[in-house]
Image (cartoon, rainbow, N blue to C red):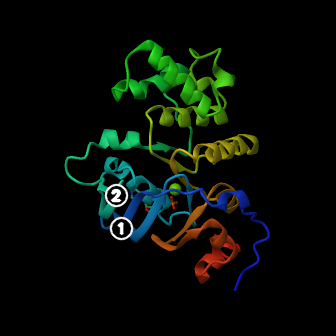
Amino acid sequence: MSVEVPQVQVNPVAELPGGGGPDKMSAHHVSVFYGSKQAIDDVSIDIPLRYVTAFIGPSGCGKSTFLRSLNRMNDTIAGARVEGEILLDGQDIYRSGMDVVQLRARVGMVFQKPNPFPKSIYENIAYGPRIHGLTNAKPELDNIVEQSLRRAGLWDEVKDRLNDSGTALSGGQQQRLCIARAIAVDPEVILMDEPCSALDPIATARIEELIDELRGRYAIVIVTHSMQQAARVSQRTAFFHLGKVVEYGRTSDIFTNPREERTKDYITGRYG
Ligand SMILES: Nc1ncnc2c1ncn2[C@@H]1O[C@H](COP(=O)(O)OP(=O)(O)O)[C@@H](O)[C@H]1O
Ligand SMILES: [Mg+2]
C-alpha cells in the first residue's frame, strides 16, 4: 500500500541509474553506549559511494551518535563505547593500530553550527593539508586552497579576501568554508550533522545544491530533521527510531512506499 505524502517531493533525477557506486562503508550490528545507557541498538547499514545517504528520525533517536561512530568521533566523549563492526573499504576502523587522525581525514565531518577556526580563510583550508603532510609548498597549498574553495562554491565570493578571518563570513559562507576545509584533505566520505539547521532558506538551498554537486566524488551522509531536505538531496534514507534503524532503502521508496508502519507514521507527521 502506498501512502500520500503530498508535502515531500522526491527528486526524480536522484534515482537515475548509474548514480551510486559500491559500498564505501558498512556497519554491522553496531551498538553505542554512553555509560550504561544504550543509544544505538544493533544497527547494520551500508553507505554507498556517489550517493547521499540521509539519516532521519525524531530528536534523540541516535542519528548523531551513529554518525559519530562512522569516524570515531565518539572516542572523544568520555564513557562512550561502540560495539559491532564498521568497515571502510572493507577494513575495520576500530581495529587496533588504526590511525584515528588519518581516519578523520578520510571520513570528514561538517557540524550543525559552522565552526571555522579563528584564522584567515586561507589558513582554514591550508591547515589540514599541512598537518596531514599532503604538502608544505606554498604554490601547491595555494592550489589546494583554490580548488577546495571552488568545489565548495565559495571561491568567487572570497578570492579577493583570503586573508580575512573565516569567522567574518556569513553563516552560509562559513558552512561552505567548513565543507571546503573537509574537502581539502581529500576525504572519501563526508558526514554532515544537520548542516543547514543554523542557516536561512537561501543559504540552505545553496548547501543542498553543493551536496548534489559533491556526491559524484564522495560518499555523503547527512543527518537532517527535515524530511523535505532528505527527499531533495538523498538517494538512500535510513529512518532511525529509539536507537534502531526501522527502515533503510531508496529515498523514493521510504517516502512514497514505506514497508514499516512506524516509518509511515513518521513521514506522514503522525509523530515527531
Ligand atoms: N554525550 C552524551 N552523553 C550521554 N548521552 C548522550 C550523549 N549524546 C547523546 N546522548 C543520548 O543518546 C541518545 C541519542 O542522542 P543523539 O545521537 O544526539 O540523537 P539525535 O541526533 O537523533 O537527536 C539520546 O538519548 C541522548 O540524550
Ligand atoms: Mg543530532
Three-letter code, disc 2:
Leu
Residue 241 sits above or below residue 134 on the image: below
Dot 1 amino acid type: His
- Where does the C terminus fall, quadrant-wise? bottom right
Label 1 CB sits under 8 Å from any ligand 1 atom: no
Q: Describe residue 141's horizontal placement relative to residue 256 as left or right.
A: left
x and y, in percent, of residue 58 in the image = 58, 66
Q: How many C-alpha atoms fall within 10 Å of the one at disc 2: few (<14), some, or many (≥20)?
A: some
- Tell me where residue 31 appears, x and y as whole percent: 35, 67
Using the image, determine if residue 261 lies above or below residue 249: below
Badge 1 density bin: few <14, some 14–19, many ≥20, Cα 10 Å: some
In the image, residue 248 lies at what x, y percent? Answer: 53, 70
In terms of secondary structure, where does tag 1 sit?
A: strand
Q: Check whether the beta carbons of the residues at disc 1 and disc 2 lie within 8 A of each other.
A: yes
Left or right of 76? Residue 56 is right
Lower position in the chain sequence, tag 1 or tag 2? 1
Residue that label 1 marks: 28
Q: Residue at x 64, y 47 (%)?
A: 212
The quadrant holding residue 170 is top right
Q: Is residue 226 visible?
A: no
Report whether residue 74 is seen: yes
| Element assignment for label 2 | strand
Question: Residue 44 versus residue 110: which sits nearer the camera?
Answer: 44
Q: x and y percent of residue 115 in the render?
A: 52, 35
Residue at x-position 44% and y-position 40%: 187
| Distance between mark 1 and mark 2 Cα atoms | 8 Å
What's the residue at 57%, 47% (across, down)?
A: 216
What numbered label is drawn on residue 87? 2
Q: Is residue 107 above or below residue 271?
A: above
Judge whether 188 appears above or below 180 on screen: below
